């Protein structure tokens, strides 16, 4: 039986078009997000800093923001809902560390510290927009950032995050990145190693040009 390759496991389209954002495109996207209103801007920041899927971000509520440890808790989507015996599986969650500035932004806009203190409204999602609306938001920011092509999507951001975590001066161990991205197997995460070499080469060439 031929097993179809999941789109999640490809960094290039069938025509060879890149499906991930480069470091510079991610930087431009982040700058372009500053022109959005506060709520939309934080949504864009969550995608950038965590590599989550837009649908995973839309589920976030104050209870999922761990203020003290500076983590965000996501329910991992796109995982099998049944085990090998056909039994329903329990939802799976993962924590992703984020910069303090993102936690502070959540607090400034959504007053999460007060909600935690009062133990109220903790399970109400931050955003009421639909997935199509979230898609249009990301597309609008990409257009403003002049990011054109197949990579100008939420998935392109997710792939860009995966590559960034492996191409820095202190790359993450592959099994840690797999956990952060909610992959069931490190085999999925290893696709990012395909382009890390090229990204590092570009960084070196850019440095020579300075």
Image (cartoon, rainbow, N blue to C red):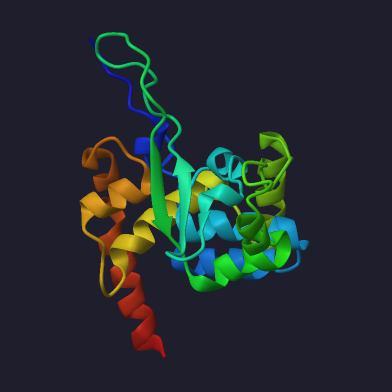
Question: Quadrant of the rendered structure where residue 69 is?
Answer: bottom left
Q: Residue at x 66, y 43 (%)?
A: 125
Q: Residue at the location (65% across, 65% down)?
A: 107
- In percent of width and height, residue 15 lies at 44, 38
Residue 170 in view (yes/no): yes
Q: Is residue 28 visible?
A: no
Q: Image height check: is 35 above or below 156? A: below
Q: Nearer the viewer, residue 80 or 8?
A: 80
Tell me: 4 left or right of 52. left
Between 173 and 188, the residue placed more toward the observer is: 173
| Count of all numbered marks drawn on residues in the image | 0
| 68 versus 19 height, above or below | below
Give the farthest residue toward the bottom.
210
In the picture, measured across the screen, residue 115 lies left or right of residue 72, that is: right
Task: Kindly identify the residue that appears in the image at 73 percent across and 57 percent down.
Answer: 39
Q: Residue at x 67, y 42 (%)?
A: 124
In the rendered image, the quadrant that contains the N terminus is: top left
Q: Quadrant of the C terminus?
A: bottom left
Residue nearer the viewer, 138 or 178 = 178
Q: Position of residue 51 (x, y in %)?
A: 46, 52
- In the image, taking residue 145 as reference, residue 184 lies left or right, namely left
Q: Quadrant of residue 160?
A: bottom left
Quadrant in the rendering for residue 147: bottom right
Horizontal side of residue 75 vs 41, given as left or right: left
Residue, far right: 37
């Amino acid at each position: 039986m031929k097993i179809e390759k999941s789109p999640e496991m490809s960094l290039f389209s069938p025509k060879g078009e890149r499906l991930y954002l480069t470091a510079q495109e991610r930087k431009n996207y982040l700058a372009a997000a500053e022109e959005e209103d506060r709520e939309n801007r934080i949504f864009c920041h969550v995608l950038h800093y965590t590599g989550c899927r837009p649908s995973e971000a839309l589920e976030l509520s104050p209870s999922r923001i761990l203020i003290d440890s500076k983590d965000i808790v996501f329910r991992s989507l796109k995982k099998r809902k049944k085990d090998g015996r056909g039994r329903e599986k329990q939802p799976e969650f993962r924590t992703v560390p984020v910069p303090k500035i993102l936690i502070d932004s959540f607090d400034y806009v959504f007053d999460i510290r007060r909600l935690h203190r009062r133990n109220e409204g903790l399970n109400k999602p931050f955003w009421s927009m639909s997935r199509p609306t979230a898609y249009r938001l990301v597309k609008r920011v990409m257009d403003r950032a002049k990011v054109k092509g197949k990579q100008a999507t939420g998935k392109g951001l997710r792939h860009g995050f995966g590559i960034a975590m492996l191409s820095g001066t202190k790359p993450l161990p592959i099994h840690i990145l797999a956990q952060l991205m909610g992959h069931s197997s490190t085999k999925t995460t290893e696709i990012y190693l395909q382009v890390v070499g090229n990204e590092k080469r570009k960084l070196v060439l850019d440095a020579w040009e300075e």
